[in-house]
Amino acid sequence: MSKRDYYEVLGVQREANEAEMKKAFRNRAKKLHPDVNKAPNAAEEFKELNEAYAVLSDSQKRGIYDRYGHAGLEGQGAGGMGGMDFSGFGLDDIFEQFFGGGFGGGGGRNPRRPRRGRDIGHELTITFEEAVHGVTKDIDVERVESCERCNGQRAEPGTSPVRCGTCHGNGQVRVTRQTILGAMVQTTTCTTCQGVGETIATPCTRCRGDGRVRKSRTLNVKIPAGIDTGNQIRLANEGEAGGNGGPAGNLFVVIDVKPHKYFRRNELDVILEFDINMVQATLGTMVTVPTIHGEEEVTIAPGTQPGSIIKLRHQGVPDVRRNDRRGDQLVVVNVTIPKSLSGDQKEILRALAETLDEDARPHEPEEKGFFGTIKDLFA
């Protein structure tokens, strides 16, 4: 059974930001959770909602999903919140786990604790040559940073936060609720200060009291030789700023290598198909073959057959993890047959044909022929 589009499940547009997705999840979770929704399929729909939000709230997984769809997330742990099934949890448990507050706005976590910033992803496209040799690139990244005007303190410079008059600086208030079991006292997050224990009388005019702002930065990234499509480069502490003095997240640069006009890659080996004419294949010759490291003279032996492979040792891709290891270049020889000949050329070939003692006949397959060799190259 095919999966529904995650954006459709969450009920948001593909351009939705983090706040819009969080709001959509909370609203739909309140309606779909089996605690309040007794429909037969409520549990399955709630599980589907969990899975959609787990992917779309993770910038790295969201980028993979936007590009490759559900297939790109196979093996990525996309199912459920971090791979967990929350169908047996109450709404308070879920919102406390992911938003720091319960269904009624409460929560046991300390809102003033340092919070690590979010990891972010950036896709970088490079050429085949750049991937083989390595390169240094400048990338433009938009991220949340600590506000320079208020140094993340949220208050306008020259002013200070004041103790919350509702919770008296505790960040939490006690609420008595009547239930079927009688009166119950619940500790909830203060809605006046959002659990911080302080209020901002004069918010910073730059960040509007958030303590963080979104900015675009140009970062210098060193791409190691031998990198391939799908590889990631981790730049520590280059993600979004943390909250309450917490550390920044990381930036993951995801590499995409453009296809080359002539070369193909098979792990560390470079594959090149090279055309020669039938006279060169029959008599043998010297040809100049391009490699990713420059041109090289190659000997074509007399009687070279179509599909023959010439190995150029150590002319392939370096191992991104080991500087002392490099692949080979495999030159697959194609023998071209002319589609049109002059009258003199036809006479020469007819005369040659009369001297050959081999007639057309079925070919006895060898243990490993042309197609077996090609199959091994790309296995």
Image: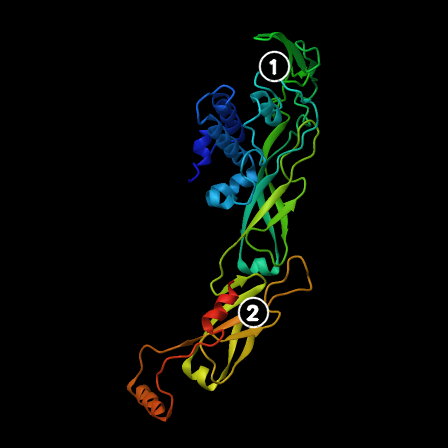
Place residue 212 in its image quadrant.
Answer: top right
Relative placement, left or right, of 148 versus 351 is: right
Q: Which amino acid does label 2 sit on?
A: Gln
Residue to which mark 2 is pinned: 329
Residue 359 drawn at (x, y percent) = 35, 87
Q: Which mark is residue 53?
A: none
**Could you say which is closer to the camera, residue 66 or residue 159?**
66
Q: In this view, does 342 lie above or below 67?
A: below
- Within-10-Å neighbours for mark 2: few <14, some 14–19, many 20+: many
Q: Residue at x 62, y 42 (%)?
A: 251
Q: In this view, does 138 lie above or below 308?
A: above
Name the image quarter holding the N terminus.
Answer: top left
Whole-angstrom CA distance, mark 2 to mark 1, is: 66 Å
Residue 205 drawn at (x, y percent) = 61, 22
What colour scheme was applied to this rendering of the protein?
rainbow
Q: What residue type is labelled 1?
A: Thr
Residue 160 drawn at (x, y percent) = 70, 17
Q: Is residue 83 above or below residue 127?
A: above
Place residue 177 in its image quadrant.
Answer: top right
Q: What element carries label 1?
A: loop
Q: Which residue is drawn at 44% across and 29% down?
A: 11
Are discs 2 and 1 less than 8 Å apart at CB? no
**Count of labels in the image:** 2
Residue 305 drawn at (x, y percent) = 46, 79
Q: Earlier in the sequence, mark 2 or mark 1?
A: 1
- Within-10-Å neighbours for mark 1: few <14, some 14–19, many 20+: some
Relative placement, left or right, of 177 versus 40 is: right
Residue situated furthest left in the rendering: 343
**Could you say which is closer to the camera, residue 19 or residue 158?**
19
For the question of whether residue 100 can be seen, the reply is yes
Residue to which mark 1 is pinned: 191
Q: Is mark 2 on a helix, strand or loop?
A: strand
